[in-house]
Image (cartoon, grey):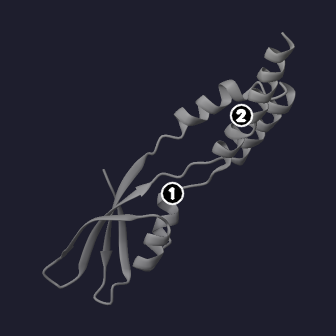
Amino acid sequence: MIKKIIFLLIFTFMLTSCSVYMAAKKEGASIEEIQQCKTRTCLIAKGAEPISSEKNGEGELIETYKVRSKKGSAARAAMHGLLDVATLGIWEVAGTPIEGAKGKKKFFAIKVYYDQKENIKKVELVQ
């Protein structure tokens, strides 16, 4: 009986903080952050992945990108941390799968119009 309790305690503490880490992990970008970019390098640094590239009749570049939606929340991470402490780590049994399901990757597409010097003129959200 004591061996089972010790095993359960060790297993529970091994899981501790997984949901906190998953909730706090910041990834992706919002459309507002993307629209602040002035260069192609900035877009790629924010995680935009090129899908297609073409030139219009005036020789200007038009590219389509997919961007991972922003995720991660300090408030959610704090709540997981509080629940971990309050339940002596048992919350991780529920919290980790919840964060795993919530952490699915969501993307949106944008179309970026460049001038002839490849500076961004306009960014559109593609529906």
Name the foreground residue: 76 vs 6.
6
- 29 relative to 102, above or below: below
Mark 1 and mark 2 lie on one chain; the one further toward the N terminus is 2
Amino acid type of the residue that numbered disc 1 sits on in the rendered structure: Ser
SS for callout 2: helix
Residue 77's tag is none
What x and y, as percent, mark residue 15? 71, 34
Q: Residue 16's image quarter?
A: top right
Q: Nearer the viewer, residue 33 or 72?
A: 72
Say which of marks 1 and 2 sits in front.
Answer: 2
Q: Residue furthest left?
A: 57
**Which residue is labeled 2 in the image?**
15
The Cα–Cα distance between marks 1 and 2, rounded to whole angstroms, is 31 Å
Image: 4 above or below 84:
above
Packing grade of label 1 (10 A; few <14, some 14-19, many >=20) is some
Quarter-of-image position of residue 102: top right
Position of 52 with respect to 48 (left or right) is left
Residue 10 at x, y = what percent?
A: 79, 29
Report the residue that reaches farthest toward the bottom.
117
Horizontal placement of 27 versus 39: left or right? right
Residue drawn where x is 50% and y is 71% of the image: 36
Q: Residue 109's spot in the image, x, y percent?
A: 34, 56
Q: Residues within 10 Å of mark 2 (few under 14, many from 20)?
A: some
Q: Residue at x 77, y 21 (%)?
A: 8
- Tell me: residue 89, above or below residue 78: above
- For the N terminus, give its image quadrant: top right
* 12 relative to 113, above or below: above
Q: Which mark is residue 30?
A: 1
